[in-house]
Image (cartoon, helix red, strand yellow):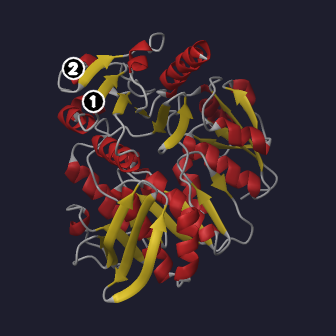
């Protein structure tokens, strides 16, 4: 780390990048960055920290900078290209993170799904009992002075997490995703096993995942779940409209009764992983109970608001397993209400590869609407459309456009769940605007 340099983030509004920028800012380093001008949900934290965010322009690059390049941008990006031509230090996001976690008790959280929620939960709990720095994939980051722990979200995309070597790892699941990079489930497993062999002290893995059960590594693997073969087991689970309550055992040892104000079975499992890590770091279980009960969630994961007679939920779910978990959570909290899903498919390759699974998960809602596929910087076109997915959905499948969200006005006293990793929030805002106008008119 260099106090004399200015750390310039190319793509500073990216969820991991903005979190990393906030950490460096907290630690007293000079930070700035560039990105698109369109407003993103990560932007507010940067603004509040007083971090200068500029529009992309190669003129931003000059002597005295250290470049941290977002992984969405190739070396042909004008700013990165100019920095390399000038001989400035250039780090990729994941490379820099690998250096940053050294010197702490580091805990990396990886998985095809659930890593952001679990990282957020673990960060909250450990921060309540000891100084903790953290990097969460919802754009939240904190560099705490004299931190004991460093909790971070470990991204498996393009094997980026291999740049980090944590003390502990939590692995929530191994599932086939990112079909633009991974060739299949065996390729994904290979990446996780390679990372597992870089972990220094121990791994905490979900016991019901068949791929995680195959892990071969030199450090101990402790499984968590709801079966008797798991090292950390949740028993007597009671799910209600206010959250979940459960007992936790480590083998025959009773660790206590825990309560969370979160919804869905996946959040019980995430909590188990956090309890397991805390147990091995000898954190007082009563403190863990208090912090778990106090956690409210992370950005864009089951974020709720009420408008007129409707409940609107915003969620990042963009894989069939995540959609299933989000709808399960909605059913737990609102068992007597109609659940309407509005889903924005994210990337053409993922939509093609997981088409049948998407349809199966979405059909768990009472009614389904789709938007057009969100293309990414890496993938702007493909031989599939939302109409192909709609044809497989038995509970609807009508395509919504941002300038006509009126089909949603047919629902009353119900729950609308907007899901996607792209810009699905613009559809949400359009619907909320319609709903607000209608409420004013009726009043």
**Up-down relation of residue 266 to residue 363 (above or below):** below
Q: Nearer the viewer, residue 339 or 107?
A: 339
- Determine the image quadrant of residue 338: top left
Q: Nearer the viewer, residue 323 or 305?
A: 305
**Up-down relation of residue 400 to residue 421 (above or below):** above
* Spot occupied by residue 383 in the image (x, y as percentages of width and height): 24, 18
Q: Pointer 1 and pointer 2: residues touching (CB < 8 Å)?
A: yes
**Up-down relation of residue 271 to residue 29 (above or below):** below
Q: Which residue is mark 1?
A: 351
* Quadrant in which the C terminus is drawn: top right
- Determine the image quadrant of residue 174: bottom left
Residue density around tag 2, few if under 14, some if 14–19, many if 20 or more, within 10 Å? few
What residue lies at 27% left-to-right and 50% top-to-bottom? 175
Q: Which residue is mark 2?
A: 388
Q: Is residue 122 left or right of residue 25?
A: left
* Spot occupied by residue 438 in the image (x, y as percentages of width and height): 55, 15
Q: Nearer the viewer, residue 308 or 392?
A: 308
What residue lies at 18% left-to-right and 20% top-to-bottom? 391
Which element carries disc 1, helix, strand or loop? helix
Q: Which mark is residue 292?
A: none
Residue density around tag 1, few if under 14, some if 14–19, many if 20 or more, within 10 Å? many
């Amino acid at each position: 780390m260099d106090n004399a340099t200015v750390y310039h983030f190319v793509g500073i509004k990216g969820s991991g990048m903005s979190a990393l920028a906030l950490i460096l800012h907290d630690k007293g380093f000079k930070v700035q960055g560039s990105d698109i001008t369109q407003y993103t949900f990560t932007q507010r934290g940067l603004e509040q920290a007083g971090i200068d965010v500029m529009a992309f322009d190669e003129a931003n690059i000059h002597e005295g900078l250290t470049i941290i390049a977002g992984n969405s941008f190739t070396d042909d990006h004008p700013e990165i290209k100019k920095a390399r031509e000038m001989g400035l230090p250039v780090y990729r996001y994941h490379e820099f993170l690998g250096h940053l976690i050294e010197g702490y008790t580091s805990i990396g959280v990886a998985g095809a799904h659930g890593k952001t929620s679990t990282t957020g939960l673990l960060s909250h709990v450990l921060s309540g009992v000891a100084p903790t720095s953290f990097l969460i994939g919802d754009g939240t980051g904190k560099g705490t002075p004299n931190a004991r722990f460093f909790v971070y979200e470990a991204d498996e995309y393009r094997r980026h997490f291999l740049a980090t070597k944590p003390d502990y790892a939590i692995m929530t699941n191994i599932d086939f995703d990112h079909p633009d990079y991974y060739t299949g489930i065996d390729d994904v497993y290979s990446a996780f096993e390679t990372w597992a062999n870089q972990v220094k002290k121990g791994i905490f893995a979900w016991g019901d995942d068949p791929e995680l059960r195959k892990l071969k590594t030199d450090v101990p693997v402790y499984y968590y779940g709801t079966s008797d073969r798991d090292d950390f087991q949740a028993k007597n689970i009671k799910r209600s409209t206010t959250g979940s309550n459960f007992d936790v055992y480590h083998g025959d040892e009773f660790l206590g009764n825990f309560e969370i104000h979160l919804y869905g079975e996946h959040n019980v499992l995430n909590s188990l992983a956090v309890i397991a890590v805390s147990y091995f770091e000898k954190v007082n279980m009563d403190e863990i109970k208090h912090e778990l009960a106090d956690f409210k969630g992370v950005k864009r994961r089951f974020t709720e608001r009420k408008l007129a007679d409707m409940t609107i939920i915003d969620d990042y779910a963009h894989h069939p397993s995540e959609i299933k978990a989000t709808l399960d959570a909605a059913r737990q909290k609102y068992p007597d209400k109609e659940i309407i899903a509005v889903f924005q498919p994210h990337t053409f390759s993922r939509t093609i590869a997981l088409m049948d699974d998407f349809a199966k998960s979405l059909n768990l809602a009472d009614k389904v609407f789709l938007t057009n596929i969100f293309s990414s910087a890496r993938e702007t076109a493909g031989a599939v459309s939302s109409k192909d997915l709609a044809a497989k959905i038995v509970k609807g499948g009508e395509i919504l456009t941002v300038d006509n969200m009126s089909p949603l006005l047919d629902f009353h006293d119900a729950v609308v769940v907007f899901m996607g990793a792209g810009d699905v929030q613009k559809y949400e805002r359009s619907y909320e605007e319609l709903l607000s106008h209608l409420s004013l008119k009726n009043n």
